[in-house]
Image (tube, grey):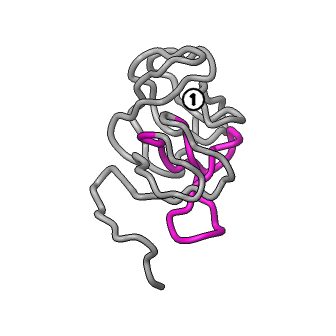
Amino acid sequence: MALNQERVIAPEIRGCYNDSGATIAKGKIVKLHSAGPAGTVRLGAAATDPLYGVAMSDIPNGEWGDVQIGGQAIVLGGGVVNQGAQVTSDGTGNGVAAASGNSSLGTAVTAGANGQFFEVELAGPGGEAN
């Protein structure tokens, strides 16, 4: 299968394609989407979605952008998240505290609040909260 964009595979960053119909904003949590070219992403729309990473900057619809999948990422909060809590996505790609059985993006390094950025140590794609 041919690649649609030349890619540099850094250990923690992936070039991803947004086909969601809207801009994916910086700090939003994304999941892989099976339609479209390899590396297509959409917002993590549910706490049980298999989460992939975090948009490092705005990714307009129909364009490629960087998604961080490892290390410490800056996530846009969707509610109160305590330092040390596992983080998942709310219905809009914002980071919220994960409940047991939710997909987990990683662990909050700093506390988060609605509409504010906070740091998350990413667990890698496909984690699950305890």
Q: Is residue 4 above or below residue 62?
A: below
Does residue 65 appear left or right of residue 99 in this picture?
A: left
Q: To which quarter of the image does residue 9 belong?
A: bottom left
Does residue 15 appear left or right of residue 129 in this picture?
A: left
Identity of the residue drawn at 57% across and 55% down: 18
Is 40 covered by the magenta stretch? Answer: yes
Write the start and end of the magenta stretch as one range: 28-57
Does residue 12 appear left or right of residue 24 in this picture?
A: left
Q: To which quarter of the image does residue 115 belong?
A: top right
Q: Secondary structure at mark 1?
A: strand
Is 120 covered by the magenta stretch? Answer: no
Q: How many marks?
A: 1
Residue 25, x across and y down, in percent: 54, 37
Q: Amino acid at mark 1?
A: Gly
Q: Nearer the viewer, residue 103 or 13?
A: 13
Identity of the residue drawn at 62% across and 51% down: 42
Q: Nearer the viewer, residue 95 or 58?
A: 58
Q: Residues within 10 Å of mark 1 (few under 14, many from 20)?
A: many
Identity of the residue drawn at 47% across and 22% down: 117
Q: Nearer the viewer, residue 99 or 13?
A: 13
Q: Is residue 125 above or below residue 114?
A: below
Residue 90, x across and y down, in percent: 67, 32
Image quarter hosting the C terminus: top right
Would you name the residue on which mark 1 appears? 95
Residue 21, x across and y down, in percent: 69, 52
Q: Nearer the viewer, residue 48 or 12?
A: 12
Residue 57, x across and y down, in percent: 43, 40
Identity of the residue drawn at 45% across and 83% down: 2
